[in-house]
Amino acid sequence: MFEVSVEETFAAGHALRNYHGKCENVHGHNYRVRVLVAGEALDSAGLLVDFVELKRVLRAIVEKLDHTFLNDVPPFDQLNPSAENMAHYFYTEMAQALGAGARTNPVRVSEVKIWETDTSSATYRLP
Ligand SMILES: [Zn+2]
């Protein structure tokens, strides 16, 4: 199996609902998100997936969140903008975008990890 990854960073504010502690107050993070994509077969150029394509897809999702107050941006106007929920959001958005393109070699998103700080992260992957 092959696996490739790309990372992006963005800044956003949030306030956690149903939470009692410092993070219920409005505050911001410099988020880092890493997407891992896996597959068994390479394309005719010897690539699992072009880094340029992967970065473009990830950047488009990041653009919707960068410099926003996450609690105002769907689905986080309903869903708590925890790192866990954000990892799942990036996972489903990436999977949808990559599945939409016509590919000669099938790829799947295998993991999304998002860091709120250098030392705190949440990961979503299929069981
Ligand atoms: Zn926070």
Image: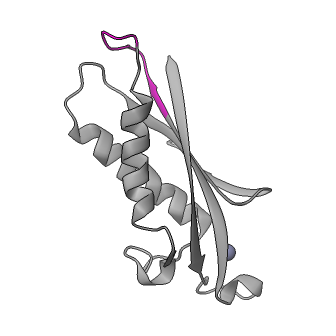
Q: Is residue 70 left or right of residue 25?
A: left
Residue drawn at point x = 38 percent, y = 44 percent: 56
Q: Which secondary structure dominates the residues rendered in magenta? A: loop
What residue range appears in magenta? 37-46
Q: Which residue is situated farthest in the left direction here?
A: 102
Residue drawn at point x = 61 percent, y = 82 percent: 16
* Quarter residue 62 falls in: bottom left
Horizontal and vertical percent for residue 7?
56, 44
Residue drawn at point x = 66 percent, y = 70 percent: 29
Horizontal and vertical percent for residue 31?
62, 61
Which one is in front, 75 or 55? 55
Asked if 28 appears above or below 6 in the picture, the reply is below
Q: Is residue 90 magenta?
A: no
Instruction: Give the quadrant of ligand 1.
Output: bottom right
Horizontal and vertical percent for residue 91?
45, 50
Residue drawn at point x = 52 percent, y = 63 percent: 86
Q: Which residue is situated farthest in the right direction here?
A: 119
Q: Is residue 80 left or right of residue 39?
A: right
Which one is in front, 32 or 83? 32
Which one is in front, 57 or 127? 57
Asked if 47 appears above or below 31 in the picture, the reply is above
- Residue 96 in sight: yes
Q: Is residue 38 magenta?
A: yes
Horizontal and vertical percent for residue 76?
45, 76
